[in-house]
Image: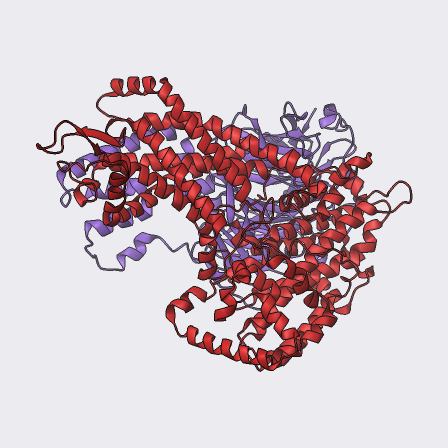
Amino acid sequence: MMCSLALFPPPLSGDGETSQYDESSTDPSVWFGDSPALNLYFPRESLKPHSRPESSSKSAFRDHCETLYTRSAGAWRDAGLSGLLNEIANSSAEVPKWLGVSSSCVLALLRWVSSFHSSLFPHLTLSSEEMTAEFSQVLDWSDCAVRSFAWHPHTQKCAVALSDDSIKIYNPKSATTPTLKHRLQRSVAALQWKPLCASALAVACHNCLLVWHVDPTSLSTRPSSGCAQVLSHPGHSPVTSVAWSPNGPLLVSASPRDTAMLVWDVAVESCVPLHRVGGGGVTHLSWSPDGSRVLAATPSSLFRVWETRMWTCERWPSLKGRCQTGCWSPDGSRLLFSVQGETVIYALTFTDNPGVPLMMSGGPKAATVVADLSETTLNTPGGDITVGGEIQSLAWDPRGERLAALVKGDAGAGRPAMIAVFKTQISPAFKLLPCGFVQGEAGTEPRLMQFNPNYQHGAQLTVCWSNGKITHVPFCFMSAGNPQPGLGGSPSLPLSQGRPANYNNQTLYTELIS
Amino acid sequence: MFSADQSCWFVRKVICWRAVASMAWSVLLLLPTTALFVVLSRFSLFHPILWISECLSLLTSTSAIFSFILLCGVVLLVGFFNLEYCTVVPSIACSKIALLGQVLHPRQFVHSLVHCIMGVVVAWCCAFTIGGRYRSLGHPCTQDESSSGPEMCLNEYHLVLLLVGAFIGYSHSLVGVVYNMNYVSFHTMQQYKYLRFKGALPLVVKASAVQALYCLRNFLLLYFFMGYAPRAWICRTLDLNINSSIHSLDSVSSLLDLSLLYHLWISGTFLLLTWYITVLLFRIFVTEVYSFPVQSTFTEESHQCLPKVITGMQPMILKFLALQDLALLSQHSPSRRLEVFSLSQPGGHPHIWTALSKECLSLLSDLTERLVAHHDTVATNGRAKSQSTGSNKRSTTSSESSVGMDDMKTPRPSALIRTPGSVFLRSSGLRTPLTTPFTPDQDSPFSSPALRRLTGPLEPQGPLSPGFSSIQSPHVMRRGPKLWSASTDSQLNGSPSPGPATSLSQAQLKPSFLVTFLQNRKDQVKQFLAKRVLIMYLFNKLPEASSQALFADSQVHIWALQGLSHLVAASFSEDQYGIVQTTLPTILSTMLVLQEAVDRHFKLPHTSSKPGHCSCGMGDDSYKTLRFALRSTLKTAVYRITATFGGHLHAVQMSAEHRKRLQHFLEYKE
């Protein structure tokens, strides 16, 4: 049988921050050593609303008559061919009749074709903002004060993207908190620090990628926009996901409108598009910690697993819905993912050598269900609580001991969004045991979570709540299979000691529970 | 140049076969391209059935097969030229005059001439395929009433098409020099050949269409003004008449004939497309990863093993592929890494690791030296006051940089990397043989700090003006206008960058009266010339060119850094005998010294800190951004080692300054 929510200990009914199964929920600040804790609070009122709609600034200026030529050129620049045609068709008084008519005809034809295209891929009808909100890993992205959050992979430093399009960088060891703002930094969907680098931060923006170089020794609180590299590619917008290779200079980026996944060589600002037929775009990317594979989810019921040696991919077509999220085990041998419309976690095992193309090696033949998070009613002293639902995002701690699943709630049905935490064991056999729920203050929902990769005493889950608070939930345990503490944050370290030589597919989940 | 046995096997067994395979594929691809061209060139909207049937009958006719064979011959020749002219280290011209020299070089002249002729051949095939009014050069006409019977008149349409072919062929060759189309770059990402080709094909089609458009524009301008010359010449040589009843084509109205423009453009696109595809396939095939054996059980194959191959000098491509293989094996294959970390069977020496690390380190320290020399040149250039401090600083840096590197220096005659003009397969004609004998002599005084200190005092009191090139490092000089070092007039007119050989030998000589006199003359001539605008335009350094030239072969250094750092990181858990630990201090200090030199280079005023964007068709401009890749790879490499070893690095012996620097890396503050 698989692990299900019914086996979980019921959450406490009170408004305690956490309800752990067997772990101390001590003050998180002690775990940052002698430095101040990074308990951040961004009340929504303090953030200025997103204020850059072109229409509002337009109203401040007097109407100015431009020639048709200027307007057409502007329309061509802003919106391409369809914009140009639209402009010509709208200003029928100024153009010759045949031109107006023909451009209307071509425009109608274009719309018809595009409607046909978007009937194949319904997500193309969404606006960019809606698309980012739809495919983001953050629950209710558009309403959230904290748009994205990223821990530095090697040092105690984190970046927080806020809904006013600024990014703040917090470092407990330094007094300055740089605020990053850029003209092109709009609707940030994802952040990631470059591994094996102190300063580079990749930001997935509205229509480009920004790579900030924030000098850690600089005392400036507002790094100039000259510190950012702008990486853009025609047709690649909005960018909803970025992933750095764990040991190299490469960065992959994805956009739901672009069927190609872009692999950037950031230092030289060049990119290689990887086109594959099907899917209609790429929504979510996740690079395995050992660097050998990349998960690429698409808006349709298909996802791909790329092998990064020769960049070939494996298709996983027959899903019920689109792949919403996925995460890799620390040794890169196991992929857990969830599918929209389903309440289970699937697992894929890759037992081949990294480097051998997937087609030729014995990749997994089928995904296995390892956990069921369907709606369950738990009895608590304060009354019954209904938990469960679709999974918004998954996070696995860097040692492979805890797995957190952010479960979408349903406010109408009285089912709050929750984080369910599992204990996991990768070697000698894959096990998934219930651990507990993480709850916030009353009336708050978790929106976004990430494990802190530099936590020495176990695992630490950073959660951003709907009220704008960011808290850190520690999980203290004695790590069983980690002989080299202090090196856990190093992605380049081959973690092969935790990987069984010949692994049986049968023991995907444990038999120990009940 | 292939006489050395050890390099010969590689060219014979691998490179030639790769070139042949790429040519075979381009000939195969010629078939669909030609078919597409036939279909598009005969396109008629209003007679679709006639159009298709004509195309089919043309494609199956024997004359079409003849022109197809001609095209195949052209493609094979282009492929051969690729093999002959392509290089993995771009030749970067540092000034306009050097560029001009490259363009006018005899070797390049041959290239241009042959491409011109091939352009005419392809255009003839196009004219034949399109048919109609383009079919032949002459057509019967009745000139006037007095002459009896039909005469042959010139068909100007045919002539224009041929001239377009020649023009595009020549400009292809010219653009190839200016945009370094002969440069073969290696990709960071490995992909299968088919997928790489598929990904690049749309870009190639677009590039050829756009390039054909530009060429056509230039050609039409040229023909509009000068069109009568080739026409009259052809008429005279072939004894053709000009049909006076038809307007000649060099007028605005007749050049704006849409059908003519379309045919010219599509022919040009076809021509460029077939050539570009050949170039593309050649690049893809030749840069494919080659997996060298790390060690061999048979002694006769030992020269093919990675440790031997990587230290080799010629051909350049062999060294590149070997280092690429090293970088890949260090990342991806644990089993081959184990071989690197293994000990020799009788004796127990880590020969493989020693050879590999020594070569990588010498490459890196070579680059450091080059950068330090360049920095000194720039820092002291034109400022008399800073001269003494500059030389002081130089001596400290050079002595410091030589710490721990002297023992790593391989005693070899001349570093190949130091002569980056050397081309892909053999040393090019662009590097004239005159420079070669000077090269080792040039480097020797600068490579050893002791000798450099000897030459140091001579510099300030040298009779040369501060801006003069005696204080420019030989590295920079050699990478600059190489042609010059051979040309005699450069020494006569005393241009700002004459051959380094002359200036340096003079500086080393006792400054006799004659020399001083000559130098004074030279100065005067130089000052006179400096006032002329055209001369200054030609001789001024192109911005960033010197920086680009410094890092022209940095792909090698990038791989060396990647290979070393991955091997060191892997050694933490895989090195059973601890052989890597013995070289760890040297590796770290080499990397840190290089890091310092690179940092200083990027602080120079003339180097931009961000890669610029250039969108020029097929020319590969990745050499322009190599220094940025190198900078980031270097940092990542140090971080990779510090992240793996962590606090253990405190036990490694190194100088206090390096320890401080390393501490920054350990705290993630770099």
Answer left or right for B259 relative to B638.
left
Image spot of residue A217 (x, y percent):
62, 66
Chain B shade: red
Q: Choose between B523 and B152: the one closer to the eye.
A: B152
Q: Is residue A467 visible?
A: no
What residue is drawn where x is 82% and y is 37%? B299
Which residue shows up at 42% across the image and 28% down it? B70
Instruction: Tell me residue B163's x, y (percent).
Output: 31, 40
Q: Is residue B646 left or right of residue B48?
A: right
Left or right, residue A34 beside residue A182:
right
Judge by depth and name the residue closer to the eye, A491 or B323: B323
The one nearer the camera, B46 or B316, is B316
State the image quarter where residue A174 is shown: bottom right
- Residue A207 vertical position relative to residue A1 in the rendered view, above or below: below
The quadrant of the rendering that contains the C terminus of chain A is: top right
Give the residue furthest to the left: B145
Chain identity for the colour purple used in the image: A
> Residue B405 placed where, x, y %?
76, 61
On screen, B124 above or below B510?
above
**Residue B400 makes an appearance in the image:** yes
Between B400 and A319, the residue placed more toward the observer is: B400
Residue B196, above or below B419: above
Estimate the x, y position of residue B355 in percent, counting from the top left. Answer: 78, 49
